[in-house]
Image (cartoon, rainbow, N blue to C red):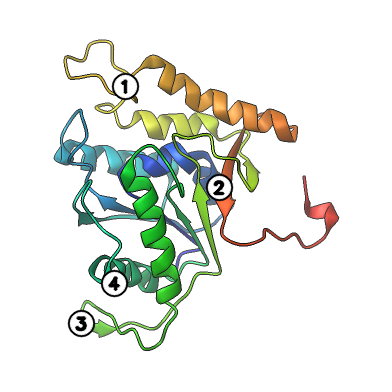
Amino acid sequence: MKLDILAFGAHPDDIELGCGATIAKEVSLGKKVGIVDLTRGELGTRGSAELRMIEANNAAKVLGVSVRENIGFADGFFTNDKKHQLEIIKMIRKYQPDIVLCNAIDDRHIDHGKGSKLVSDACFLSGLVKIETELDGKQQDKWRPKRVYHYIQWKNIEPDFVIDVTGFINKKQAAVLAYSSQFYDPNSKEPESPITSKTFIESINYRARDLGRLIGVEYAEGFTSERYVAAENLSKLI
């Protein structure tokens, strides 16, 4: 299955938090979108890896993506080396996306920056014909995405561009809240973490509203780019 967009996240819920509204909007526009989670989030403070897989599948249904896979790297301990790069390359060549979305280039959680560089490097290597990969017994063709963008996560990184996601923020919040074990629950007896407070959930809406304010729309999500962002002409800019 060829996809228009393939979004990678170090953990289940990274993508929903970082660019869930953008993905929901792209799906509504008829784009085929897929998600690949690098780890099962087994080191998460709350819940379990098994529960998080169920939550991830529920979130995928909310967003309407075509496919969601989990590579099963070690949460907190995966590295940017040949072994891990080849697994990412297999996913890129399998789905042949035009656009790849990946973790923030720098963030509070060490897996986010690592995952960002790992996926970015694999996107380049995937286009080299002399790197051979095989999936399900078949040799894969080389494939390099046209664009690689990084969504914004915990840190307020200055975006290179923003996407108007007005009308899709509720779907993003529903996808995030599909991870009921991970976020605010006044009845939970599990340990607290930086993402379990009520204010964290509120900040999702606030950040999108503030970015929207800056470009004259209701809600927006920000991204950074590895190369200049180009427009066809001035009238294509909001």
Q: Amino acid at mark 4?
A: Leu
Which residue in the protein does label 2 denote? 28
Which residue in the protein does label 1 denote? 196
Q: Nearer the viewer, residue 97 or 112?
A: 112
Circles 1 and 4 in contact, beta carbons < 8 Å:
no
Is disc 4 placed on a helix, strand or loop?
Answer: helix
Neighbours of disc 4 within 10 Å: few (<14), some (14-19), many (20+): some
Circles 4 and 2 in contact, beta carbons < 8 Å:
no
Neighbours of disc 3 within 10 Å: few (<14), some (14-19), many (20+): few
On screen, residue 129 versus residue 135, left or right, reads right
Q: Amino acid at mark 2?
A: Ser
* In this view, 214 is above or below 10: above
Measure how far apart labels 1 and 4 are at the Cα level. Answer: 34 Å
Is disc 3 placed on a helix, strand or loop?
Answer: loop
**Residue in the image at 32% along x and 66% along y:** 88
Measure how far apart labels 2 and 3 are at the Cα level. Answer: 34 Å
Which residue in the protein does label 4 denote? 86
- Picture coordinates of residue 145, whole percent (x, y): 50, 69
Q: Which numbered disc, 4 or 3, marks the residue that appears first in the sequence?
A: 4
Is disc 1 placed on a helix, strand or loop?
Answer: loop
Measure how far apart labels 1 and 2 are at the Cα level. Answer: 30 Å
**Residue in the image at 52% along x and 39% along y:** 21
- Picture coordinates of residue 87, whole percent (x, y): 27, 68
Q: Nearer the viewer, residue 133 or 157?
A: 157
**Residue in the image at 23% along x and 55% along y:** 78
- Picture coordinates of residue 17, whole percent (x, y): 43, 36
Which residue in the protein does label 3 denote? 137
Measure how far apart labels 4 and 2 are at the Cα level. Answer: 32 Å
Circles 1 and 2 in contact, beta carbons < 8 Å:
no
- Picture coordinates of residue 148, whole percent (x, y): 52, 61
Q: Is label 2 or label 3 in front?
A: 3
Name, please, the residue furthest toward the bottom. Answer: 130
